[in-house]
Image (spheres, rainbow, N blue to C red):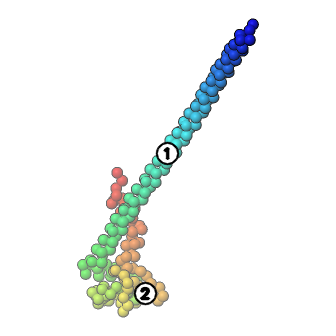
Amino acid sequence: MSIESITKRIEDEAKAYAGERKAEAEGLKKEILADAQTKADKIMADAKERADKESKLLAERRESVAGLESRKMVLEAKQEIIRESFDKALDKLVNLEEADYIKFIGNQLNAFGKEGGEVLLNAEDKKKYGDKLAKLLSGGLKLSEEAANIKGGFILKQGDISINCSLEKLLEDKKEEMVGEIAAKLFPEK
């Protein structure tokens, strides 16, 4: 065998060996890339699933907050309407016809006739109705020279004690009792 044929044979064997190694490396490379792609796909799928869940949860939270805010705004509007209703009722009481107003105040005062005390009216009521109300006072009740800072009704002073019988206070007390009933009438459930 000649040197050339030996060299050729060595070269051929080396090429064959290199080809085998290259084929093995290509196969290993494909396996590694396929495994890496599988892992990357799983990571992406998990991240998408997490993002979808978080997005859905965030949307639900925002919807819940929006629902709460909406209900809060509706409640505030209802409370404002009820407040306006009581304000209108107070205006109606303050502006009753003179005979009706005097009768109303007189009836309220009858409960205190035996106990006595000073009756304070607001300045306008004192000027308009003072003389007529003074005639209705019985027992130890007398009309005070002082004026009360109220819209209507009276304040009864008995020594150091003041009993607030102003129209504002009377309506406020009734409001606490009647707000549920009024709300049901103004805003019936559908």
Circle 1 residue:
55
Q: Residue at x 30, y 75 (%)?
A: 91
User: Where's residue 99, x and y in %?
Assistant: 25, 81
Can you tell which of label 1 and label 2 is closer to the viewer? 1
The local secondary structure at tag 2 comes to: strand
Q: Which residue lies furthest to the top in this view?
A: 1
User: Where's residue 133, x and y in %?
Assistant: 31, 86
Quarter that holds the N terminus: top right
How many C-alpha atoms fall within 10 Å of the one at disc 1: few (<14), some, or many (≥20)?
Answer: few
Q: Which residue is drawn at 55% across and 37% down?
A: 44
To which quarter of the image does residue 166 belong?
bottom left
Q: Which amino acid does label 1 sit on?
A: Ser
Q: Which residue lies furthest to the bottom in this view?
A: 145
How many C-alpha atoms fall within 10 Å of the one at disc 2: few (<14), some, or many (≥20)?
Answer: some
Please say if 37 is above or below 55.
above
Looking at this view, is 175 or 53 the one in front? 53
Q: Give residue 183's mark.
A: none
Q: Give residue 157's mark.
A: 2
The local secondary structure at tag 1 comes to: helix
Q: Which amino acid does label 2 sit on?
A: Lys
Number of marks in the image?
Answer: 2
Looking at this view, is 150 or 10 the one in front? 10
In space, the residues marked 1 and 2 are separated at their CA atoms by: 66 Å
Looking at this view, is 81 or 173 the one in front? 81
